[in-house]
Image: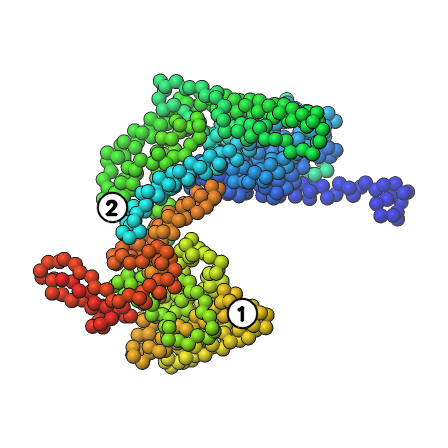
Amino acid sequence: MGRLGCTIDGNLDVSKFSQPMPWIGAYVAAASAACAIAMAVDAFHGLRNRKLWFPCKYFSLNATTLTLIAVAIKFSVDLNTSMPRKQDQLAKVSSAVFICTVMGNSMPSLGTMENKEIFMNVVALGILVITAIVNICIQMGTGVIYTFQKEHAFVMFLMLVLLAILSSSALTVPTTKRYFDLKYSKKHQLTMKEWPNTAEKCTVNKLRGDLRKYWMMAHTCCPQFVMGRSATCTASGAFCLLSAAILAEAMLRSYFMPWSFKFCHGESDYKWSTTLVLVTQTIAVGIGTIATAFRWFTAINFRCPKKASKAIKPQFKVESYWIQTLVEWKERPLATKIYGRHGRKLAHNMKEKFLELCIGMQTGVVLVSKMVRLSSIYFVSRFLICYRGCRKVKWLFKCNNSVSSDESGSESRTSSNLDLSRYVLYLEGEEELVDLMTENNCDATDRWFRMGKKLQSRDLIQLLEKSTSSQEFKGVLHFDSDQVPSLDSEEPPNCWALPVVTLTSIAVALPNIDYHVVKQLISGVHIGIMCARLVENSLHAKEDFKSIMKAADNVWLGVDLHHKWLDVDLRKMALQVESSKEVLEGLTAIAKERFLEFKKREMTKCLWDSPHRWPIKALAANSMYRICQTILQDYESRDYGCSETLFGRVSVMISDILCACFTNLERTIYTKCHQSTIEEREDTVCHAILLLGKSEKILKILNQKLPPSLNPDQMASIDKWRECNKQKKPLHFTSSLSSAESDTVISFSPERDTVSTSPDLHLTIE
């Protein structure tokens, strides 16, 4: 037996070299399938959200996808593996067409990248494409590719064209982002003048109208949408369709016209995996062509004249934003360490000549793209005009036979009457698209709003309806008393969620409470905390509060999933104790013990100098200690002998705190519309619309109450809310009613969920 890798006679043993090749082919098929799945998810996402320009959310140019593409195109760059059979030669074609498909499919993703990231990804893709073209040419010369040579030649030409178009599009991204950021800021200032006065009630309809404006602004300046409606992206869609047609032509000819080909006998080293790769990449090309074809068709639909008699105006002007980046590079001084004057002059002149050549090439690419778009419009316009006519007739028929009877329909029509065209952001040369973009996107907010309404929580609404009947929300003031002795010299600040979590933990631990009622409370609080987190992240997300908010999230995770506060089983405690007072005393003792334990441990690490640096469990223990002590101080005077009574009291406190927190929802919704980068702005506005839909009933509940007498900054913080309310006296509100009601005096107890004769707050109606 010879040495490893050698035969008995000492020659190189090549018999095992081809054994792993089928599994390598399977690996190529797996990479192709991964790309196909990502493109399919993007296509589904675009169709589901009616974004027919198909943003790249999952399949975009990045290190991962470039690696997958490099693996998937192995058949195109394999120089010396024999590919004799029909499926082998077709797999070579499918691999080349796959490159065209992924380039066209991922083009809008350039809009989401930073300048440096764009440069690196485009260069990496360029190296990959050039390598594939060179290797295909070598294989055509050596005979590895011996058929479908015309198809390969045409596909390689399309590769170069698509690479040039992609590079051309990448050059416009920095310029268009700066332009749209400036325009959005100006439109935002215009919209701010129409904001509701914070001292007045703001209706849901008013918020919906404002969000329509923000949606139109955010959507039309979305970098991926800007890229998707550009001339270069339209041309790339046409070329991708053409490459897919070449693959289809090659496959159909090989199977239905076998006499026109003469394939070699033998078997490839890839064996059965060649067929797997061919099928997988054909499916990937088909899926990837969906997005590029829709982008091409949608851009043509935008540009197509509405009437057959209207001439198509050729637009061969190259707008300034196409070459602005190159012009800036040309005018920028050359940063060089050349000390000689003649050397600097030569380098500067060479730079200018090179950039002038690039500007000329950029102009040529744009003009070719516009010619492709114009020719596409010429061939498709008649079909689109007929289609629009049919849609218009159908719409008129529907309008004449429909009668609106529900409130949502009337609201939708009222909001649709808003002039949204002045909130459309567009580039030079896109003036004719304003009406179409307004028409195609005017109902998007209604769709998101309806989706949000479906997510409204009945349990949360029922919980909020327990709140006291004044927007003083006494529970905010009464959950923590200043008479409770502190466990430390300094007290940490409070957030909205932590006292809600602590009070809910106490409610879960109370004995003799129906589990269904407890479960309903937990369900309502869970949704309420999610909304409270949005408010705090939007308005109050300072470094000092991050640990407090994290403590609330961590504690709530245990209460919600396991009914445990830290490691204390609350339901087990409810079964073991006999009275609610024992629960409060037990939780107080446990909280104090845990706090002192954490304090002793952290002081040895010198991390106890500020409450903001306390561990999250110490913050939770401090909150539990103070709230339990506050309730115990008031236990005898309030007659909390019955657990149901205390449970009702705690529920009202939770409701008051959440209602006070939710008075910031309007400001949160507005803030989400402009506190984001241009790449994220469309998503944040969409989330704001969903939030409005989910909180519609919450806002109606709050609007039924009296307006708060705090300014927005005070409303955002629970500590400032408490501080201001401590300085106030009970308020008396007067209303002019009929003489039959003039002598009526109504008294409410803010601590309870029922009408009583408690003198805490009097609403006198005269």
User: Can you see residue 753?
Assistant: no
Q: Looking at the image, is 580 positioned above or below residue 539?
A: below
Residue lying farthest to the left in this orientation? 739
| Residue at image mark 1 | 608
- Residue closest to the eye, 539 or 270: 539
Label 1 or label 2, whichever comes before in sequence order: 2
Amino acid bearing label 2: Asp
Towards the viewer: 668 or 151: 668
Picture quadrant of residue 166: top right
- Which three-letter amino acid code belongs to the residue tagged 1? Trp
Mark number for residue 406? 2
Which part of the image, by quadrant, shows the C terminus?
bottom left
User: Where is residue 453 drawn, in percent x and y?
Assistant: 34, 51
Crowdedness near tag 2: few (<14), some (14–19) or many (≥20) residues, C-alpha within 10 Å:
few
- Measuring from the top left, give residue 91's x and y in whole percent: 64, 33
Query: Do tag 1 and tag 2 residues touch (Cβ < 8 Å)?
Result: no
Please tell me whether residue 608 is drawn above or below residue 212 in the rendered image.
below
Q: What is the count of numbered marks?
A: 2
